[in-house]
Image (tube, coloured by chain):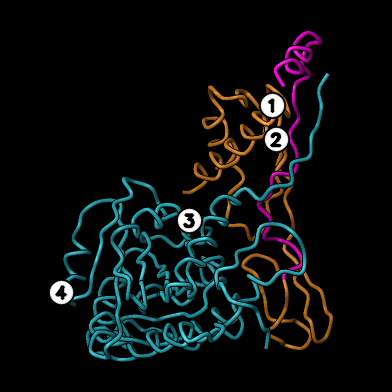
Chain colours: A orange, B cyan
Amino acid sequence: MHEMSIALAVVEQVEDAARSGSGDAAEAVRLQVGELAGVVPDALRFCFTLACAGTVLDGAELDIDPVTARARCGPCTTEWDTGMPPQLCCPNCGGATADMVSGRELQIVSVRWADRPAHDRAHVTEER
Amino acid sequence: MCRVVDLQQAVLAKNDRSAQELRDELTARGTVVVNLLSSPGSGKTALLEAELSLARQRGIAVAALTADLATENDATRLARSGAPVKQVLTDGLCHLEAGMLRSHIAGWLPGDTRLLFVENVGNLVCPASYDLGESLRVVLASVTEGEDKPLKYPTAFGLAHLVVVTKQDIAEAAGFDRAAFLAAVQQVNPGVEVVFTSARRGEGLGVLIDHACAVHAGHVPHQPVMARTAGQGHVHHHDGVVHTHS
């Protein structure tokens, strides 16, 4: 199970964003997880809670947007839901050279930061 | 009150960057990395031992790095081939990451190495998500594992440049249905080549080396559909050379 490594990678990137001034405390992180990303959302949620402890994400929610896997055949332009397990041969012409349109995403979309009190904002500005 | 700030970063961006840097560095010095993935017990080590011996007979400078959760048994077996071998203990981690590979290569890999085989941790789930900087990704399955293995582990099989079937010498006894296996592979990775091997009988061993040497010579390997993207998001590029889709 590599969901803990994935969760730690998310935490690391959000902490980097915090250090570069995006915010102090993350309330929620939104991820896109493709059907073919090889990640189990429930396992990721469990690991995320543990990975966040003691960081700027302590107690943060994880919002997962699942993305359906779709492929598109170049030669005949057919586009289809690949399903799971995926059917990656073109269902129309049998072609073997399709491209993935979606479904491989493992992407941090956005972070919801708690608003800083006014005096904190001034303090941060001064530090810069 | 709160603020939502867009980040739009691939979760594995750091690993992917590290992998690409390693691929570029190794390509520049003339080394091609072959990443071997399979489930435990599929015969990775036996195949690799035979491949290393054959490569050495052909005068190809090879080396191997083998990863396990514990024990150095695999390195001991592989070293019998005479090739430089290094054991990596992951201390329980279920996969290798590019940064780990890089740190293990530093100061160890002989400068003239043409092919570096990396035997990943025996696992068909987690290693599939991590680009190691390889130019050839190979997934193995033995004839005893069931013909639907590619459908059960679509990411591992779907991203492979080459599929190797092992233990072909016991295929008949195991009741292996070759056609069913090939159909399952083609469903998740249309057009990928499947090689049937037996480390014990020495069957089919040259094909993997031929593929690796072809990549070394600049040949573009098979491009799996799953790795080809028309959209956005995190997609692995584990070839290191310019794509030309045929």
Earlier in the chain: of badge 3 and badge 4, it is 4
Q: Dot 4 falls on which chain?
A: B
Q: Are marks 3 and 2 on the same chain?
A: no
Instruction: Quadrant for the C terminus of chain B, please.
Output: bottom right
Contact, mark 3 vs mark 4 (Cβ under 8 Å): no
Q: Which residue is mark 3?
A: B126
**C-alpha distance separating marks 4 and 1:** 53 Å
User: Seen in the image, is A121 located left or right of residue B20?
Assistant: right
Q: Report helix, strand or loop for mark 1.
A: strand
Q: Which mark is residue A29?
A: 2
Q: Which mark is residue B80?
A: 4
Q: Are marks 4 and 2 on the same chain?
A: no
Q: Position of residue B57 (x, y in %)?
A: 23, 89
Amino acid type at circle 2 is Val
Q: Dot 3 falls on which chain?
A: B
Q: Residues within 10 Å of mark 1 (few under 14, many from 20)?
A: many
The residue depicted at 34 percent of the width and 60 percent of the height is: B105
Contact, mark 2 vs mark 1 (Cβ under 8 Å): yes
Q: Dot 1 falls on which chain?
A: A
Q: Confirm whether the magenta stretch covers residue A107.
A: yes
Q: Position of residue B2 (x, y in %)?
A: 81, 23
Q: Confirm whether the magenta stretch covers residue B219.
A: no
Instruction: Quadrant for the N terminus of chain B, please.
Output: top right
The range drawn in magenta is: A100-128
The residue depicted at 61 percent of the width and 67 percent of the height is: A85
**C-alpha distance separating marks 2 and 1:** 7 Å
